[in-house]
Image (cartoon, coloured by chain):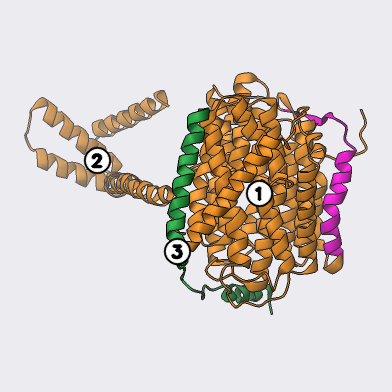
Chain colours: A orange, B green
Amino acid sequence: MTINALPPALILILGGLLVPLLKGRTRQAVLLLLPVISFINLLQIPVGSHWVFPFLSDQIVLGRIDKLSLIFGYIFHLVAFLSALYALHVNDTVQNVAGTVYAGAAIGAVFAGDMFTLFVFWELLTISATFLILARRTEKALGAGFRYFMVHVAGGLCLLAGIIIHVFQTGSAAFDLIGLGTTASWFIFIGIGVNCAWPLLHPWLTDAYPEATITGTIFLSAFTTKTAIYALARAFPGTEELIFIGGAMAAFPIFYAVIENDLRRVLAYSLINQVGFMVVGIGIGTALSINGAVAHAFNDLLFKGLLFMTMGAVMYRTGKINATDLGGLYKSMPWTCAFCIVGAASISAFPLFSGFVSKSMVMEAAALGDMRWLWFILLFASAGVFHHAGIKIPFFAFFSHDSGIRCKEAPPHMLLAMGISALLCILIGCFPQYLYSLLPYATDYEPYTISHVLAQTELLFFSALAFTLLLLAGIYPAEIRSLNIDADWFYRKGGRQVYRFCQWAFDGINDWANRTIAQKMTKRLSRFFEEPGGNFQKYGYRLLVETSGIDKNYEKMEKQIDIRSRMATYSVGAGVLLAVMILAFASLLLFFR
Amino acid sequence: MSKHKQHRKHDHAEKEDGPMILDHAAVDGYRPIFYICITIGILYLAFVFWRTW
């Protein structure tokens, strides 16, 4: 079948690479138009596998179009456009190129029909994301970018190892259901898990995202983790391990988010928490739960992007992002404040906001599967997310105490990007059927039942009451400018111990090799080859004397050999013997070659 | 001014010069209310679990 379209990732990646050739308003227009043209291009591609090329003994597929890849493709294009709009003022070639290529790589990954194509786009995600972090050009960003790169290269290698073993064992590189069981599948599982920010593998996210540029963080919050969610939904649906991993992801970041002072880092922890819901949904593996995971990924891209945008706007105008420095900004930035509240309501799953219509699908699936403990964890996580993202973020940035900061409202293009995101959050919350029609499985799920609305409202209002009372009673923990120890402690301490061990082990071997080979052996060899003929005779004679037990004129004989050797005056017999010995030695070398 | 210098300048502006701690002073009379609410909440939760688990 002939298709009048290009592979889905091509427009954004090639367009992004051409951006440095453009300047001023032309560049701004192209940056905005690229996601739009790419989206129109995507709409021209029918369902099925396209751009299939032979590769080694298998084939690569650049465009596998089905309902699962399409919904991720749609939202990735939308977020790429909103991020480009938000970053319209940025006249930094590194950020412009990296942001566009990053979005293109994510789109390429979700439409990859084989694992090799997936891997290539997976690594392109890492490279472009690293530039988005480094582009801030601070010492902290440099460190965070370097750590981000190392962790993701390690994850990518793990993925590649799994892919190679999998292809070797099964003879197929198609990226479809894999399931856990083989060594290869575990490698692929963990490789994806690194990008998904699973517990203990997550510190890269909370380390790097708050250190990236203001606009870079908007791009970063969207693509890496959601691409991993797509990969899990494609390859590991119904994997029980994911339920435990997702449950832990949903719960543990809450504690860190409560005590964190940097509001972008609070959102980074919140991102892990929300991804936890998606991982749980994929782990449960029913049609409802996978629909819930995908719908929540769709919504999270909008409301989490919106929250990062509002905090980015605050940072852009005030130069500050710590809760200790902010407060009382609602007068200076009323629109940003309003959009932040919409984002907060959406992530908290207030009725009529987007989070409500997707989060409940995962929780309902847990309840239907009779997983009460999981349902309770998710309920706890819901209350927690309302507290740290729903209340803490808007409260400490825009209300709380008056920091005395008076600044301008965010620029119009930022407001427009935030406004569109906020509007979509409300529209999806009010009319969820449009989102449901895009989901991978047909669904007649109804989020607005009396019990669900009441239970969620009850949860949210009691959480708000708890926050208020904690604050008024003076029990709520103070915001402290500090460094909170997370799982990165294991990396830092463990890394230092590994370094010490390597230093001890490898330096020891190195010292021994230096003493024995570089110094002693070379000295002996050089001494031997000063007079090779004489030394042959001398050591041969010494061997003869020591084995036969005869010890007459030992030293005298050696002196004679030395003199003859230097003067090159040998008796005929000794010369023949020497020649025979050299020939024998050469024959032995040839024999054992 | 070069782009790099601009970034450095922006970076300088971001230096942490705000307060170290933002604590939340208690308002008189709210601590007993908090404890009462917490007790009621725990009892309510226990009741719900007892009825439904």
Q: Element under label 3?
A: loop
Circle 3 packing at 10 Å, graded few (<14), some (14-19), many (20+), is: few
Marks 2 and 1 share the same chain: yes
Q: Which residue is mark 2?
A: A535
Can residue A148 be seen in the rendering of this structure? no
Q: Which residue is mark 1?
A: A347
Which mark is in front, 1 or 3?
3
Q: Element under label 1?
A: helix
Measure how far apart labels 3 and 2 are at the Cα level. Answer: 101 Å
Identified by mark 3, the residue type is: Gly
Secondary structure mostly taken by the magenta-highlighted segment of the chain: helix
Q: Residue at x 60, y 30 (%)?
A: A366
Marks 3 and 2 share the same chain: no
Look at the picture and state if A48 lies above or below A331. Answer: above
Image coordinates for residue A567, horizontal then vertical, percent: 26, 47
Q: Nearer the viewer, residue A508 or A179?
A: A179
Circles 3 and 2: CB atoms closer than 8 Å: no
Q: Element under label 2?
A: helix
Write down the region rendered in magenta: A26-55
Look at the picture and state if A160 lies above or below A145. Answer: above
Q: Which residue is mark 3?
A: B29
Measure how far apart labels 2 and 1 are at the Cα level. Answer: 85 Å
Q: Quadrant of the N terminus of chain A?
A: top right
Identified by mark 2, the residue type is: Asn
Q: Residue A449, labelled with which disc? A: none
Identified by mark 1, the residue type is: Ile
Q: Quadrant of the C terminus of chain A?
A: top left
Can residue B9 be seen in the rendering of this structure? yes
